[in-house]
Image (cartoon, rainbow, N blue to C red):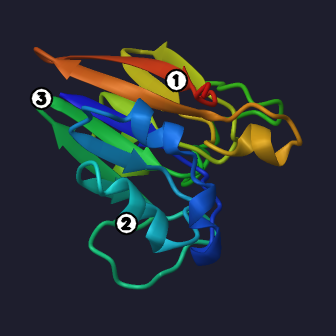
Amino acid sequence: MKIGVISDTHLFQDDIQRVPPETLHAFYGIDLILHCGDIFSLSVLDYLETLCPVIAVQGYKDTTDEDCRVRGRTWVVEAEDIRIGMVHDINWPSPRLLTDDGLLEFPPEPIADITKIKFGSIVDVIVFGDTHKPLITRHDGVLFVNPGSVLCFETEGQSSLGTVAILTVSAGKVSSEIIRLSRELK
């Protein structure tokens, strides 16, 4: 199973055309898309759903309108035998795991105890956003993935696009990669 992970699109209804078509190209053949919050407009989820089902969690400024795709502040998705915890800000709820300089710092207690606090259960993977910086790391057997932001580079005045992530779940194992989006040459 292939799962696309995206976060921090920060787009309102009138801005939906700013979602780069390269995003859909990167997610071609994906079975599920997870959006880790700061969506702003549900039209972003509509756009992504043209490929496959979408599940999202709320970011700080996301609407609280009823939409079955948006599952609250945290959510656990089961993909085959893998449990994926979704949250926008990895520091919510406590304990804090992200330092001010954008690095993950783990407390001495087992990561399983921390995932129980954050998600109500043990998870194999944590996907999160908020920082706009892509990250993949493992700690205590848990895979941590931040896909970055599709538009983060564009908003910093650079010409390149941002990033998304792909999770591959197979035979009870999960791997991840960051996809750096780039403009198609015409």
Per the image, the residue denoted by label 2 is: 46
Q: Does 94 sit left or right of 116 as displayed? A: right
Pick whichever, 140 or 38, lies toward us.
Answer: 38
Q: SS of the residue at dot 3?
A: loop
Q: Which dot marks residue 81?
A: 3
Pick whichever, 121 or 138, lies toward us.
Answer: 138
Residue 130 percent across, percent down from the top left? 65, 48
Residue 146 percent across, percent down from the top left? 55, 33
| Amino acid on which the number 2 mark rests in the picture | Asp
Q: Considering only vertical position in the picture, is 38 above or below 108?
A: below
> Is mark 2 in CB contact (under 8 Å) with mark 3?
no
Label 2, label 3: how far apart the Cα atoms are:
28 Å
Question: Which residue appears at 53% of the width and 72% of the height?
Answer: 41
Label 1, label 3: how far apart the Cα atoms are:
24 Å
Q: Considering only vertical position in the picture, is 135 above or below 79?
A: above
Of tags 1 and 3, the one toward the viewer is 1
Question: Which residue appears at 86% of the width and 42% of the height?
Answer: 156
Q: Quadrant of residue 171?
A: top left
Q: SS of the residue at dot 2?
A: helix
Rate crowding at label 1 as few (under 14), some (14 to 19) or many (20 or more) other CA atoms within 10 Å. some
Instruction: Identify the mark nearer the N-term, 1 or 3.
Output: 3
Q: Quadrant of residue 166?
A: top left
Judge whether residue 114 can be spotted in this image.
Answer: no
Q: Which dot marks residue 179?
A: 1
